[in-house]
Amino acid sequence: MKITDLFTPGRTGFSFEVLPPLKGRGIAQLFRNIDLLRQFGPLYINITTHRSEIVFRNTPDGLYRRVSERSRPGTVAVAAAIQQKYGLPAVPHIICSGFSKIETEYALIDLNFLGISNLLLLRGDKAKHESRFTPNENGHSHATELQTQINEFNRGFFIDGTEMDIVTDEKFSYGVAGYPEKHEESPNIDLDIAFLKQKIDNGAEYVVTQMFFDNKKYYEFVERCRNAGIKVPIIPGLKPITTCSQLTMLPKTFHVDIPMELANELMKCSNDDQAKAVGVEWCKMQAADLIANKVPSIHFYSLNAVRSVEQIARQIY
């Protein structure tokens, strides 16, 4: 079933995002986190994908060896485990960053075998050692190129143009990201929305937004999208603040504004417990307003915030 088929008119759905465990760790803690939020009837669960990073390892002769490592592998396996255990649609992220076209194809083949047909397509972040995004050798530079590969896979063609012997009836469907405060690399919001419109025209069926802390920015973004001819559902993404340091870290990392009222309350906090309480109340206020305005669903970024999301969901769902 497609994600867009899960939305019910007049009712705001609930979904959240999880990270694959760090390399070498088991999946038990991830399941415990999902168990905390499952009671609120999530429509689906997103699973992030993380690119490889360059690290330098000491060698016995005292030199350093340059190594490419992925700290959180296993997105496909985690998606399969979640879908099997909970009977909920799992939505793995498929990204350009750190992956070649053939690696993406292998992931699509595995997902197809496993009956996982819902995806979220993203370009992904630049590597930590890069000043700007650089695709892998034989990789994609933009999410629109990733769309083309998946559209061709749906038509029954591999990346080298070879036709599949058997084309599955269950095609991949996918959403893409939207940025109410524009993508950090976009010259302006209008051009950013023009690129988003291109993704919708290429086959994206819904949009999930970057986190925001001022609902006005979301409503303005939706209005701009509608005026640009984007008619698909636009799902707001929310993240409850959980630490004092996020007052400056989130704007730096995600290029989002913290409203003055929220900033003032966070600056009064002397510890993370106080900041977490402020974050829960602010996010709860955002969610309640979005529900009152009949958004199709709310997507929660639950990284290090599962308990906060549980508190919020318990009061609004």
Image (cartoon, rainbow, N blue to C red):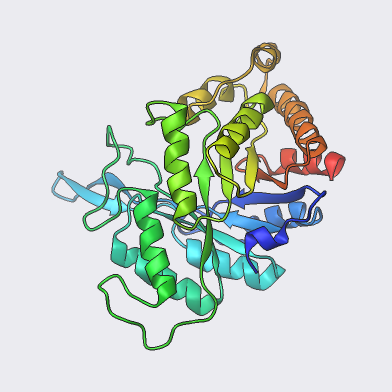
Residue 267: x %, y % from top left = 65, 12
Q: Quadrant of residue 294?
A: top right
Count of labels in the image = 0
Task: Say which of 23 and 239 sits in front.
Answer: 239
Residue displayed at 78% across by 56% down: 8
Q: Is residue 42 left or right of residue 99?
A: right
Residue displayed at 21% across by 55% down: 137
Residue displayed at 32% across by 41% down: 127
Residue 23: x %, y % from top left = 45, 57
Residue 131 drawn above or below residue 68: above
Residue displayed at 61% across by 63% down: 90
Residue 249: x %, y % from top left = 51, 25
Residue 194 drawn above or below residue 41: above
Can residue 242 be seen in the rendering of this structure?
no
Residue 165 drawn above or below residue 218: below
Query: Which quadrant would the N terminus be assigned to in this image?
Result: bottom right
Q: Quadrant of residue 161?
A: bottom left
Can residue 135 be seen in the rendering of this structure?
yes
Task: Say which of 204 and 33 sits in front.
Answer: 204
Q: Is residue 313 left or right of residue 270?
A: right
Residue 99: x %, y % from top left = 32, 57
